[in-house]
Image (cartoon, rainbow, N blue to C red):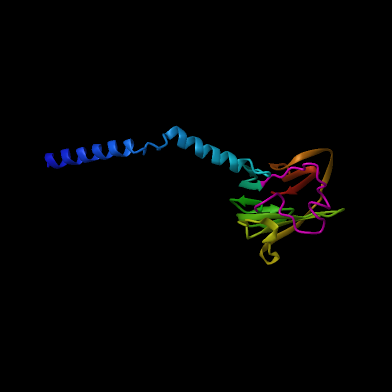
Amino acid sequence: MKKTNILMMAIFLAGSVFFYSCGGEKTTDSSEAEGSEMQELQTQDQRSSPLRSLEGTIGESNVLIQYGAPSIRGRVIWGDLVPYNEVWRTGANEATFVDFDSDVKVEGQDLKAGRYSLFTIPKSSGTWTVIFNSEWDLEHGHFQYKQENDVLRVESTPEWAEQSQEQLSIAIESPGIVVRWERLILPIVVE
């Protein structure tokens, strides 16, 4: 048994010497590997509409929201980039989703615990339609939206700020969920 172990060790060492002498020393140490992984993560984080997620509570419900955060970048948003009277993914890239761990009321209407995509229908005046849809994992947002999967549609009254906000943000704050972008403030009442 000892002879077998010694022989195996000798073969391993001989193979290692041969490998390194033939220029096989192109391995990366752990710091190089970590650096490449970090660079890959930075590339993903540097997309033009960064992915954001936040957690909070509304009443007794724990809430998780994930969305792509586009910036204005000199564009006309309402009625142009985001057309009026059409379903908008309320963010960029993937569909925005909201996860409630217990039942809630949205604008006074019941919504069961679960994960939903969040869509809106902007309008040039009056209330906006807010949609919670059962298909929450949509890679291309409103391009894959199907109305038959709507779980709840409610109306919310937008407010308009004097100052413009460059990047879209969604917050868990009074009165529930608040969407802000450009001059829009869209409060969605959640209890």
Image quadrant containing the N terminus: top left
**How many callouts does the rendering have?**
0
Q: Is residue 122 toward the left or the right of residue 59 in the image?
A: right
The residue lying toward the viewer, choosing from 93 and 170, is 93
Q: Quadrant of residue 151?
A: bottom right
Residue at (46, 34) in percent of width and height: 32
Residue furthest top in the image:
31
Q: Nearer the viewer, residue 107 or 162?
A: 162
- Who is closer to the viewer here, 52 or 23? 23
Outermost residue toward the right?
125
Classified by dominant secondary structure, the portion drawn in magenta counts as: loop
Residue shown at 79% from the left, 51% from the top: 81
Please state if 144 lies on the left or on the right of 84 as rendered: left
**In this picture, residue 178 sits left or right of residue 136:** right
Residue furthest front as drawn: 22
Q: Residue at x 78, y 52 (%)?
A: 82
Magenta segment: 68-94
Measured from the top left, where is residue 25 in percent x and y?
37, 36
Residue 98 covered by magenta stretch: no
- In the image, residue 82 lies in the stretch drawn in magenta: yes
Q: Position of residue 34 (x, y in %)?
A: 47, 36
Q: Nearer the viewer, residue 35 or 129?
A: 35
Residue at left 61%, top 51%? 99
Residue 147 in the image: x percent, y percent? 70, 65
